[in-house]
Amino acid sequence: MDSTETVSENTLRTIRFERPDYIPMTFWINPACWHHYRQDALFELMAAHPLLFGDFTWQESALPELDPWEQAGAPYTDAWGCVWQTTDDGITGSVTQHALSNWSALENYAAPDPARTNGMTAIDWAAIEDKVLKAKKKGKHVAGSLEHGHAFLRLSYLRGYENLLLDMADADKRLWRLIEMVESFSMGIVRRYVDLGAAMMRYPEDLGAQSGPMLAPEHFRTYIRPIYEHIMAPARKAGCLVHMHSDGDIRELADDITAGGVDVLNLQDRVNGIDWIAATLKGRLCIDLDIDRQHITRFGTPGQIDDLIHREVQKLGSPEGGLMMIYGLYPGVPMDNIKAIMDAMERYAAFHS
């Protein structure tokens, strides 16, 4: 398994503020949806929205293969020794056993090898190189990615969230040894993608809670920001675009998150506030806006959904670029609302063109 993907020329122009033809729109369907909705109904919607789903054809469609940490009733141990469990097929589980919950285990602990694994499962760099070369021959651009939760979250998977926050508060010297392991592993992944000529590198993890960040800003600056700056440096040096993702309220961390030279910041709309995003980030970097999944798209009307996406495009977009949008579909959203989201994303993609 790998996280390599192609990136369109229009997307690169959007990120670089080079007047793209349209706003890049991504509609991602969580694997759990395929057993929570009628599959033929989802296929019909996909076929009816070619801007979002490209050359999708129902006849050639295949259901996504579940990752082992997305399989209910089957605990999975990742390459770091952390055990994951989920209760619903397709939904990423949570860590229920932390490899280093007791510091005594650190003495004989060894980090996984980035030549063999991405941290969650095995990685085949020869296959990735072949994939990249084939894409380049077709004139396509390639993006690589770290696994979601590469820094702060990985530390929390290893130690446990509460333990980690106490480690930071206590300035425990053992934490620095663990940070070095985590950073070195990620650096190995980043350098390999950069050496292959990736046009963009993704650095995804979650730092925000429903209100405020998951860790104190001063602890982020001390322990996590240096990791970001170090592992983003090879991409920056090679002219590779840097894409950062975090769910939750990250307003207090935004300046520190982007200090390493972030070109694209993927963040959630309503939890951070559309007005705040416009005032603080618009024009400074490319906004990859995560459309609301908690309120309007789940409980609102199709009209309210259209109004939300229309307002976001008006407020955050421009003819020069700098706005991308993504929606992640999870079980529970009414079918009429799913259609309304797809319709609005396609309707307003060319709003500034």
Image (cartoon, rainbow, N blue to C red):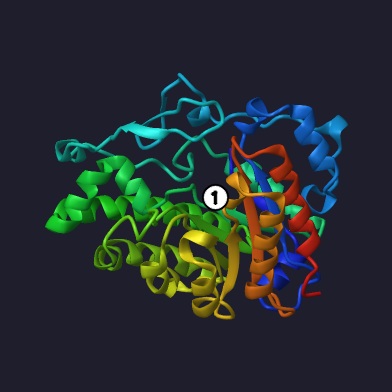
The residue that label 1 is drawn on is 295
Residue 297 coordinates in the image, percent (x, y): 62, 49
Q: Identify the residue shown where x is 19% and y is 36%.
A: 105
Classify mark 1: residues with Cα within 10 Å, few (<14), some (14-19) or many (20+): few
Circle 1: residue type: His
Residue 196 coordinates in the image, percent (x, y): 62, 57
Q: Nearer the viewer, residue 147 or 139?
A: 147
Quarter where residue 345 is shown: bottom right
Q: Is residue 313 left or right of residue 139?
A: left
Q: Identify the residue shown where x is 63% and y is 74%.
A: 315
Residue 88 coordinates in the image, percent (x, y): 51, 26
Q: Nearer the viewer, residue 327 or 95?
A: 327
Q: Nearer the viewer, residue 61 or 237?
A: 61
| Observer able to see residue 280 | yes
Q: Identify the residue shown where x is 43% and y is 49%.
A: 149
Q: Identify the residue shown where x is 28% and y is 35%.
A: 99
Q: Is residue 147 left or right of residue 79?
A: right
Quarter where residue 138 is shown: bottom right
| Observer able to see residue 134 | no
